Each structure stands twice: as structure tokens, then as C-alpha cells.
């Protein structure tokens, strides 16, 4: 049986199913910055978005120029050759505040008909695969300026033919569904929950799941995990208890991971991770929390959950594997030392994990019952914030200066 169109492509941040798991393939393992790079292409400015791949097109967002003089931009490259196919600009960018931040952190999403791009400036647009703009809107003009202290990070997702965007911040927080063909609003719901200062600020991307025969969006922020009906945005259930001492500044960056009815929720600035049984009705805090672990966690890199296990890496490169139903630690290891920290989320292909470190290091590790065996460590003269892409036997890395395609 052939793979679905989505599985043959990389339509969104973290892959075909949005869970950090690549489709089966023969992905490169033995490579370096000079050996195995099929092509690399320069980028016109800074950006942290992960590329999407559909057919022969690799698309990403990027600043075009730097600082307040730069523009929001989208670029298309040929998957086979790396030739730049098109570049589109949308007006002035809103530059990044963080040293690795930018105005182009949200990743695009595609349904195979159009590419949706979103920027810190509030600009959202749809393009076809030849770079023609189909529609354009300003989310912040429509719904209000974001009050995030740092750089917009949430990416739009597609669910049941709707374009979903979550804005969780100090102001009026909301989830909105737009028509991906026109940009018109389908529904919008508020998500305003009491929480300490900064804890309501979320850079998290919604997770699309199927529960009880319907599509449910997992939304993480303001110290609560909630499930929303993708048909109308209605909150079906919520789970709290993540900040019982009401600590300030527990903003959320890493998204939850989801598998087999369980959400893995990292929180507390790398101090904690919890397993939550999804589903139910109303406040499920007392019944849904399966387990919690302290001194284990991740702040920026979203975990991978699959086949009863969860894998995640913290800022300094410690990797854990936990049993999904119980939270039991199956193994832990530390990746080889290198410059910078881990902002990029890991990707799993079969039994192989791929990691990118901020200062250009890329690690490939084999997963086994006894732990993680590093089978390749290499370094690029670049900086990595974006999550790696594994599609059609290729590894695509988006750096600060270049986009790279690595193959056998």
C-alpha cells in the first residue's frame, strides 16, 4: 500500500502527523557539512520557521533584510536542486527580541493546495506553489496586538479543513478557525484563564488529535491543558494542577506531545513533565493526571511520543526516554558537548533520533532498550533553531544563513 500524500510530504512543523515522527524511509546517517550535502541555498535574513515540503517545492518564511528595515518574506526552493523558485515579501517585519528570535518563527502549513504563512507582525497569507498570493490578512488588526514578552512562536495548523490559530498571552486570549481558501473567520472562542504573571503567555502550537470520533485540539497555556472541538472551538475538558504554588513566569514554549490517548506536558521551565489522559468532560484535573516527574523536562524543544514511549531533550542536551502510560524512566543520556543549547525539537525516523544544537551541531542516535547510541555527530557553520525535516530519504536543515538538503 502506498503512503498517503501527507506522508510523502512534510506539510507542517513536526511532520506528516504533527508528532515529530517521519514516514518510513532510508534517511541519511553518515554525513557531514561537506559530505552528503546535495545542495544548500542562502537565505535573505533571519527566521526560525521549519520548512514545509510538498511535491517539488520546499517553502519557508524568512526575514528579507535585517531589523526594522527588513520585510516579512516567503521563499520557495526546488526540492531536487535547491534552486530558488520564488520570493514574496509582505511588508515590514517585526524583528525578534531574543538573540535567536526573529519575525519569522511560526512555521508554514500546507494542505497541498496552498501554503499558509504567518509572521510576528500579524501578517497571515496564503500562496500557491508558484508564489502567487491568494489572500492576505493582518491577524493583529483583526483581533488585537499580541502582548507576548518575546517572539511569536505558535504555528497555524489544519484540522478538518479549517485553519487553526491560537493566541495565548496577557491580553484577551483566543483560538480562531479560518477558511484556508479565503482567510474568512469560521469560528472564534475566547480562552481566558486566571494565572500568575507571564504564565498565560504561550508560544505553543495546537496539537490536532482524534478523540471519540471527533477532531479535538489540545491547547496548552495558562497552566492548563484543554481539549477543544475543532468543529466549533468549544472547550470540552480542561486539566490543571500544573502550578499549585502559583509561580510567576512559567510561560510555555514546548508543545505537548500526544500518543495513544496520553498527552506529555512539559512545564515549569524544565522542572517537570506530566502524563495526562485526554478526554472526558469539564474539569478533569482530579482524574486525568496519570503521573508527574520532577527534575525531568524540556523548556523549548517539543517531545516525541510514539509506541508507548516519550523522548525529549532539554536545553543542555540531556535526553530522556519515558514509558508513556506510567512515566517510568527507561533511560537517560547526555548528548556530546557543543556550543549553545537545544531550541530545535527532535525528530524520530524508525529507531533513529535527529537533534540540532543551536551552534550548528547535528546528532544522529539509534534508540535501543539500553539507551541512545550516537552514530553521527557533525557541525555546520550555521545556527539551528528550526526543527529538522525528514522526507523522501532526505534530511532538510534550516539554518540562520542557509537551508541544506542532505542525502545518501
Image (cartoon, helix red, strand yellow):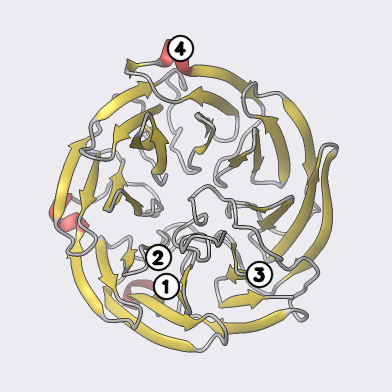
Q: Secondary structure at mark 4?
A: helix
Say if residue 244 shows up in the picture: no
Mark before the other along the chain sequence, 1 or 3:
1
Using the image, determine if residue 60 lies above or below residue 2. Answer: below
Residue 286: % across, % down? 44, 10
The residue nearer to you, when weighing 2 against 308, is 2
In the visual, does 92 lie left or right of 295? left
Q: Mark 1 falls on what kind of element? A: strand
Q: Which residue is mark 2?
A: 104
Q: Sequence-wise, which precedes: disc 4 or disc 2?
A: 2
Residue 181 sits in which quadrant?
Answer: bottom left
* Nearer to us: label 4 or label 2: 4
Q: Quadrant location of the C terminus?
A: bottom right
Of marks 4 and 1, which one's residue comes earlier in the chain? 1
> Disc 2 versus disc 3: distance between alpha carbons?
27 Å
Q: Which part of the image, by quadrant, shows the N terminus?
A: bottom right
Q: Residue at x 29, y 24 (%)?
A: 194
Q: What's the CA distance linking mark 3 and mark 4?
A: 43 Å
Q: Position of residue 263 (x, y in %)?
A: 51, 31
Question: Marks 2 and 1: in contact by CB < 8 Å?
Answer: yes
Callout 1: 10 Å neighbours few (<14), some, many (20+)? Answer: many
Q: Which residue is mark 1?
A: 62
Residue picked out by circle 4:
287
Q: With 324 as the anchor, is 90 left or right in this view?
A: left
Tag of residue 393: 3
Look at the picture and state if 14 lies above or below 281: below
Amino acid at each position: 500500500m502506498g503512503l498517503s500524500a501527507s506522508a510523502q510530504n512534510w506539510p507542517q512543523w513536526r511532520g506528516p502527523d504533527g508528532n515529530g515522527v517521519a514516514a518510513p524511509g532510508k534517511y541519511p546517517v553518515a554525513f557531514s557539512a561537506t559530505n552528503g550535502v546535495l545542495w544548500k541555498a542562502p537565505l535573505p535574513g533571519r527566521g526560525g520557521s521549519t520548512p514545509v515540503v510538498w511535491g517539488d517545492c520546499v517553502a519557508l518564511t524568512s526575514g528579507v533584510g535585517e531589523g526594522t528595515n527588513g520585510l516579512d518574506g516567503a521563499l520557495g526552493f526546488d526540492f531536487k536542486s535547491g534552486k530558488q523558485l520564488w520570493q514574496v515579501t509582505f511588508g515590514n517585519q517585526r524583528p525578534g527580541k531574543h538573540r535567536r528570535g526573529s519575525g519569522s518563527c511560526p512555521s508554514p502549513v500546507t494542505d497541498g493546495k496552498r501554503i499558509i504563512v504567518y509572521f510576528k507582525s500579524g501578517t497571515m497569507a496564503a500562496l500557491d506553489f508558484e508564489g502567487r498570493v491568494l489572500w492576505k490578512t493582518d491577524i493583529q488588526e483583526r483581533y488585537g496586538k499580541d502582548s507576548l514578552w518575546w517572539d511569536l512562536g505558535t504555528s497555524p495548523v489544519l484540522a478538518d479543513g479549517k485553519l487553526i490559530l491560537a493566541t495565548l498571552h496577557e491580553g484577551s486570549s483566543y483560538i480562531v478557525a479560518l477558511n484556508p481558501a479565503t482567510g474568512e473567520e469560521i469560528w472564534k472562542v475566547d480562552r481566558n484563564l486566571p494565572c500568575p504573571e507571564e504564565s498565560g503567555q504561550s508560544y505553543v502550537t495546537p496539537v490536532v488529535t482524534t478523540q471519540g470520533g471527533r477532531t479535538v485540539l489540545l491547547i496548552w497555556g495558562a497552566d492548563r491543558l484543554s481539549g477543544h472541538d475543532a468543529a466549533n472551538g468549544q472547550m470540552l475538558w480542561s486539566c490543571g494542577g500544573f502550578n499549585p504554588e502559583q509561580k510567576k513566569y512559567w510561560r510555555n514554549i514546548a508543545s505537548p506531545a500526544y500518543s495513544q490517548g496520553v498527552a506529555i506536558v512539559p512545564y515549569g521551565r524544565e522542572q517537570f513533565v506530566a502524563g495526562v489522559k485526554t478526554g472526558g468532560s469539564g474539569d478533569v484535573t482530579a482524574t486525568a493526571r496519570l503521573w508527574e516527574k520532577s527534575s525531568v523536562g524540556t523548556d523549548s524543544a517539543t517531545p516525541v511520543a510514539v509506541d508507548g514511549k516519550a523522548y525529549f531533550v532539554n536545553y543542555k542536551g540531556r535526553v530522556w526516554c519515558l514509558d508513556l502510560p506510567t512515566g517510568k524512566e527507561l533511560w537517560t543520556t547526555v548528548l556530546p558537548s557543543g556550543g549553545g543549547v537545544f531550541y530545535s525539537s527532535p525528530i524520530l525516523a524508525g529507531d533513529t533520533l535527529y537533534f540540532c544544537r543551536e551552534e550548528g551541531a547535528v546528532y544522529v542516535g539509534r534508540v535501543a532498550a539500553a539507551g541512545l547510541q550516537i552514530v553521527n555527530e557533525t557541525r555546520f557553520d550555521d545556527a539551528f533553531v528550526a526543527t529538522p525535516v525528514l522526507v523522501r530519504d532526505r534530511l532538510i536543515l534550516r539554518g540562520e544563513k542557509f537551508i541544506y538538503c542532505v542525502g545518501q
